[in-house]
Image (cartoon, coloured by chain):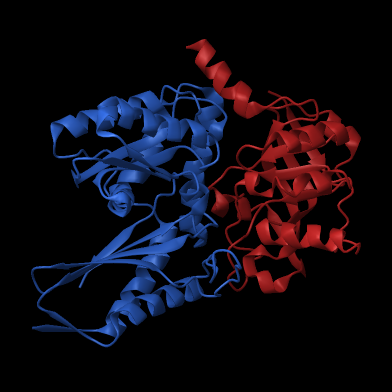
Chain colours: A blue, B red
Amino acid sequence: MRTIAATLIRDTVARLCMEANQTLSPDLENALRQSAESEPWALAQSTLNTLCENLDAARETGLPICQDTGMACVFCEIGQDVHIDGNFEAAVNAGVAKGYTEGFLRKSVVRDPIRRGNTGDNTPAVLHVRLVPGDRVKITVAPKGFGSENMSRLAMLKPSDGEEGVKQFVLDTVRQAGPNPCPPIVVGVGIGGTFERAALLAKQALLRPVGSHHPDPYYASMEQELLQKINAMGIGPQGFGGRTTALGLQIETFPTHIAGMPVAVNISCHVTRHKEAVL
Amino acid sequence: MTEHRISTPFTQEKAAALRAGDRVLLSGVIYTARDAAHKRLCECLERGEPLPIDVRDAVIYYAGPTPARPGQVIGSCGPTTSGRMDAYAPTLLRLGLRGMIGKGARNQAVAQAMQETGAVYFAAIGGAGALAAACVKEAELVCYEDLGSEAIRRLVVEDMPLTVVLDSLGNDLYRDGPEAYRNQR
C-alpha cells in the first residue's frame, strides 16, 4: 500500500489548472498552426494567424489563452493499492480554488444553476473517478469553456437510425452551433452506453490527441469522414467563412442496450485544454 | 473588405458607414457587460431608475476578463457568446446603444432593433483573450463589483481589431461569409 498525501493532490490539481489555461497540448497547437498554413480562404487564414499569435501572446505575457478559463473537469484514475492520506474530494476542490486564485484565472462557477451566485473560487470541480489496478494516481484537469459547452447536444436515437442517424446528428449539431463555439472547433462524440455514459464518453473523446484515431477501423473511418464533411460546411474560423471549421473529431464508444443508441456530441473550441500528471 | 479607424463616441453617422465584413480598429471608451450585468441593467430600467452608464452612442463589450496580475491593466479579455444577451439588447439599443462587441449569432429581434436604431454588431476574435488584453490601456470598475468578472468595467482601448458582423442595413457576415466561401469552390 502506497500512501499519497491529499496535499500533494491539491497542489498537483492547482498546478494543472494553471498550466492547462496557459499552453495547449502540442497536438492541438500543431493542428492549429498547420491549418493556418493550409487554409485557402484569405480572411480565414488571417483569423487563424491571429489565433496562433494569441498562443504566443499567452506564453509571453503569462495571461490565460482565453478569458473563459472554464469549469474544471477533473478526471482521476486511482490505483487500488494507494491510500490517500486526507479527504480526496476536498483536496481536488482545494486544488481548483488554489489554482484559479493564485493563477489569476477567472472564477466562472455559480453555486446554484437557477438562482446563480458566484462561488468566488471556481469550485466545485466536476470530478470523475475510476479505480484502477496499481499504486499510481493519474490526474487530468480539463478546464471547459461554456461558449462551446452550450452548443453540445445529446440524442437517444433508435437502433434503426443506424450509422446514418448518428452522422446526421453530429453534423446537425455542428451546423446549428455555427459561429457560436469559437470555431475552429474540436468535436467529441460519445456513442452507446446509457444517457449519462454517452455524455461522459463525448467529454473523454476531447481528452484524446487531435488527429488520433479510434482503435476500431470502422469508427476511425467515421471520424475522418465526419471531419471532412464538417470542413466542407464553409463555417470557417469564427464563422466568417473558410475551410477550417474543425481541427479534430474523436469518437468514443461503449456497448449499449438492445433498445437504444445514445449519441452525445460535446463541442469544444480551439482552446481545448487538458493537462495531466501521474503521482 | 474595407478597413476603418474609429473612435468613440460611436455616433449614428460612424455606424452608418460600416458594412458587414469590414475590419475596424476601435479606440476610445467601451464598457464590459455580460449576462448578470445585463439582467441588472434591465431591472434598473423596470424600476424606472437611471442606468449606471450612459448607453447613448456607447459600445458594450460582451466580456468577462480574467483578474489582472499585479502591474497589468487587465487579464485575458476576449469576447463571450453574444446570443445570451439577445433578451436584453433591444431595450438598450432603443436607448441609443450604438455598438456591441461579442462573438456568435444574434436573433431576429436584435437585428430588427439594430436596423431601426442604426447600430452595429462587431465580432472580436473568440478565444484570443491574451492578444485582446494588449489593446486595453485602462480598466476601471464602474458598478456591480459583487459580480466579479461580470461587473461592468470602463475600458479605454487602442486600435482594438474588430470585424463588422451585422451592419445597420441588416447584412450578416455569418450568412454571407460562409456562402461566399462555398460559392467560390
Tell which of B3 and A5 is nearer to you: A5
Tell which of A198 and A71 is nearer to you: A198
Image x and y of residue A180, in percent: 55, 40
Check the image and report above or below for B167 versus B64.
above
Residue closest to the far bottom: A86
Image x and y of residue B20, in percent: 71, 27
Report the side of A73 relative to B27 (left or right): left
Q: Residue at x 32, y 47 (%)?
A: A202
Residue closest to the far front: A259
On the image, which quarter does residue A165 sit in?
top left
Report the side of B175 relative to A246 (left or right): right
Tell which of B43 and A278 is nearer to you: B43
Residue closest to the far top: B184
Residue B99 in sight from this viewpoint: yes
Report the side of B7 relative to A46 (left or right): right
Image x and y of residue B117, in percent: 87, 36
Tell which of A46 and A1 is nearer to you: A1
**Total numbered circles:** 0
Q: Quadrant of the C terminus of chain A?
A: bottom left
Q: Quadrant of the N terminus of chain A?
A: bottom left
Residue A36 in sight from this viewpoint: no
Q: Residue at x 13, y 36 (%)?
A: A216
Q: Residue at x 26, y 40 (%)?
A: A260
Q: Residue at x 48, y 38 (%)?
A: A183
